Each structure stands twice: as structure tokens, then as C-alpha cells.
Image: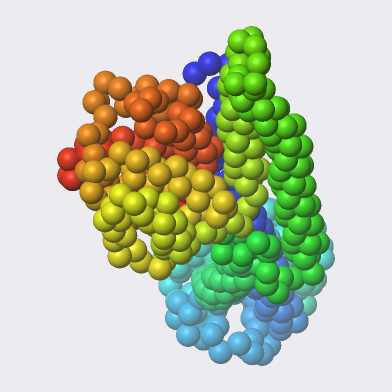
Amino acid sequence: MSAGAALPPSPLRGSLRSRLLLGTLVWIAATIVAAGWGLGSLFRQHVTAQFHAELLTHLDQLTANLALDAEGRPALALPLSDPRLSRPYSGCYWQVDGMDAGAAATGLLRSRSLWDFVLAAPADSPADGEIHRHRIVGPEGRPVGMVERTVRIDDAADGRPRVFRLIAAADEREMEEPIARFNGTLWLALGVLAAGLAAAALVQVVVGLSPLDKLRASLGKVRGGETPRLDGDFPAEVMPLVDEFNSVLAQNAEVVERSRTQAGNLAHALKTPLSVLANAADAAGGKEGSGGRRDARELARLVAEQVETARKQVDYHLARAQAAASVRMPGTRTPLLPAVEGLARTMRRIHAERGLDLHVAELPESLAFRGEMQDLQEMLGNLLDNACKWAAHEVRIGGRRQGEMLEIVIDDDGEGIPAGQRDAVIRRGVRADEQVPGSGLGLSIVDDLARLYGGRVELADSPLGGLRAVLVLPAAK
């Protein structure tokens, strides 16, 4: 790829709907993920704090009820209140270890829920009143969280203080399972919320941009010649654009009409002196019998030839200027059937003495040319006139639509034109036969006007034996 080659437009850059929808969906996804992570973290903190608060409650009860019996062994004055402490492997445990003289005696007292299991706490000696937290392996190999504190009790028998380590523990499933259930419900709810927000965003984008689709359809009607301006009820944000575009259309129509008027005025201004010159040439040429000189006749002939040439050029450039202005004017539409029937009636009158059979095929009323009536009459009139001049007995006119183009077919039963000469007769000023009246500009004007509209003229053999002329023009909707 060369350095100056343009990159193909991506769907994101080329579609306003895609950009709005993608931006909204990305923002929704980011918000949902952030909300899920934040709410999940808050709930985990809450459950973890509640878990350890419950352990501290058990530890405080254990501390309050710990005492020494008559033999100096630790005992509980009252059982702890949580019934899970009496059910084996319930997930809630307590234990008392002896710490006298730095030697630990584990499991001096245990909750019934531990059954035959002894909690193996890390070697640790919390200071008086200090609480330590640990994560250890509990019954059935499951992880448990524990809190511990050291307690000193004076022995009434020998007066020597006894040191104990009090442990309260619980299976971490008591903490993880509520978190897992909450996260599952949370993400399910957030997923439903995200789907609802995405659907709402899609509806909002589609509904919000629907005026643009309506505007595009209205522009298509203007381009297709169905209406000369944008019509419809548009939102307040779009109406300034519609008004400005209608102003441009009105200004363009005014410029086209002014150009056409000026071209017509110029043509009339030139035709008047040309007519005077032609009349003067005729008058000068007619004086031969009354003593006029030979050079006067030569001057008259020369002036007449130049006047005729100037008239041809004026007609040619006037038609081309009018067509060029019409091509740039949107919203033009000309039905084909009325134009063809009108020209057929005219040609029948012009060539009445020849008795030609001028037949117009059945044309659908929906066939229409995307351009001005005057230009269509100019092109069809020239082709029909040529066909009638060359035809022996019959001329036929038909038409059809091929995709976005309109094909108008004119057949005659004349002598036709050899294939090698067809391109030449379309060139300006070239005539196939000097014996047939005409300027040689007809086919050239038709070809130029058709090309201005994006069409063309094609010459071929006719089924009638003569020439077939096919005029291809843009079709209106």
C-alpha cells in the first residue's frame, strides 16, 4: 500500500450508531464490573468482620467461665451458650491449652464439637489482654479461623498463678458459603441489569437516530425527483439542518433558473442580429437581376453560411448550458409516457406527407426520467426526427427500466448506418447523408446531453431493417 493510499473506513469510524452503541455498552460493562467488585468486597468485609466478632464473643464467654477446680485443673463454671459447640464437627469449636513454665499442654479442655480432635495452634504467647488471629487446619482437614488470648489464674491451693491459652475457632465455610451465595445472586442480578441496560441503550440509539433515517429517505425522494424539498416532521435538533438544506435547494433552483434565463436571453440577443444579417444577405443576393454585381452574390452566400453556422452553435450551446444547469438541480422528475406521446403527435404532423406508421409501445406510467422535461424533449425529439427522416414506412418507440437506468428504444426501417460509421455520425457536425436536411448537430446534442446526465446513446441494427437508437438515461423513482 502506498503512503498516500487511504485506509478503508472501519465500522466504528463509519457508523454513528455503532460508535454510540459501543460506547454505551463499554460504559455499562465497566460500571457493572466495578459495582460487582465493590459490592462483593463490601459484603466480604462485612461477613469476615461478623465471623471474627462471633469468635470474639465465644472467646469472651470462655474467658468469663474459666475457673480452677479444687485440684487446680481448669474447668468451666457454665457451658457456652452456642449449641453448635455441643454437636461434633459442627464447625464451631473452643479449646484451652496450659502454658505453665513455658511448656504448652494442648487440649486440657475442649468443646464437645471437637470430639477427639485437638487444635494445633501455632507456638505463640500473646501478652495479657492481647488477641491474636490465625488460620489453621481443623477437623476433617478443613481450614478454620481462630482467635486466642492468654489468661492467668491464681491457684488457691498453692497461690501460684496458672497460665492458659484460650482458643475459639470456626470452620471458614461459615464465612465462605454466604459470600459465595451472595456473589452468585449479585452477579445474576447485575447480569440481568446489564442486559436491561444494553436493551435500553439499543432502543435509545435506534429511536434517537431514527430521524436521520427519515432524513435520508427524504433526501432520496429529493434525489429521485419525487419532491423538490425536504418535507417531514423532524426533531428540533435536526430542523436547523433541514431548513439550511431546503434553503440551499431553493437557492440552487434560483441559480439554475437565472442561468437558464440568461442563456435564453443571450440566444435571443444573438438571433436578432443574425436574422438581420441573413435578411440582408438574401436581399443582396436578390439584386442580381437589377444590376447587382457578382461579388455581392458571393458576399450574400458567405454571410448566409456564417449566419447558419452561428445559429447552429447558439442552439447547440444553449441546449447544453440548459442541460448542465438541470443536471445539478435535485428533485427533477419527468414522466416518460406524456413526453413520448407529445413528440409522436408532433412528428406525425411534421412528416404527414410521408405517411409514416409511427407506433408508440405501451409504456408503464411509472417510467420517469430523472431530469428536466425540456432536456428529455430535446434528446427524444432529435432521435425521433432523425428516425422519421431516414425511415421508409415505419418508426417504433419503446421503453423499459433496467436497474437504475431508463432505456428508450427507437427503431426505423430505413437504410441504416454501417457499423463502421456509427461512432462518426455522433460527433458534432458529421452527417451520414448530405441529401437529407439537417445540421449534423442532432446526434451530437443528444449524446452530450445524455452524458451530462450520466447516460449514453447507442446505435445498433434494428429488427425493422434500419437503425436502432437506444437512449440510456437515469430513471426516477
On screen, residue 429 versus residue 165, left or right, reads left
In percent of width and height, residue 148 lies at 69, 65
Q: Is residue 146 above or below residue 6?
A: below
Residue 215 picture location, percent across and down: 64, 63
Q: Residue furthest front?
A: 290
Nearer to the camera, 64 or 254: 254
Q: Quadrant of residue 331?
A: bottom right
Location of residue 279 by image quarter: top right
Q: Is residue 180 visible?
A: yes
Residue at the location (50% across, 51% down)? Answer: 377
Q: Toward the viewer: 448 or 297?
A: 297
Q: Is residue 179 above or below residue 8?
A: below
Write the residue at 68% across / 88% down.
77
- The image position of residue 308, as x and y in percent, is 59, 27
Q: Is residue 62 above or below residue 428?
A: below
414 sits left or right of 70 in the view: left
Measuring from the top left, give residue 160's x and y in whole percent.
78, 67
**How many numbered discs, if any?**
0
Q: How is the image coloured?
A: rainbow
Considering depth in this image, is 162 or 304 the residue closer to the camera?
A: 304
Can residue 220 be seen here? The reply is no
Q: Residue at x 64, y 90 (%)?
A: 81
Q: Residue at x 79, y 62 (%)?
A: 243
The front one of 264 and 294 is 294
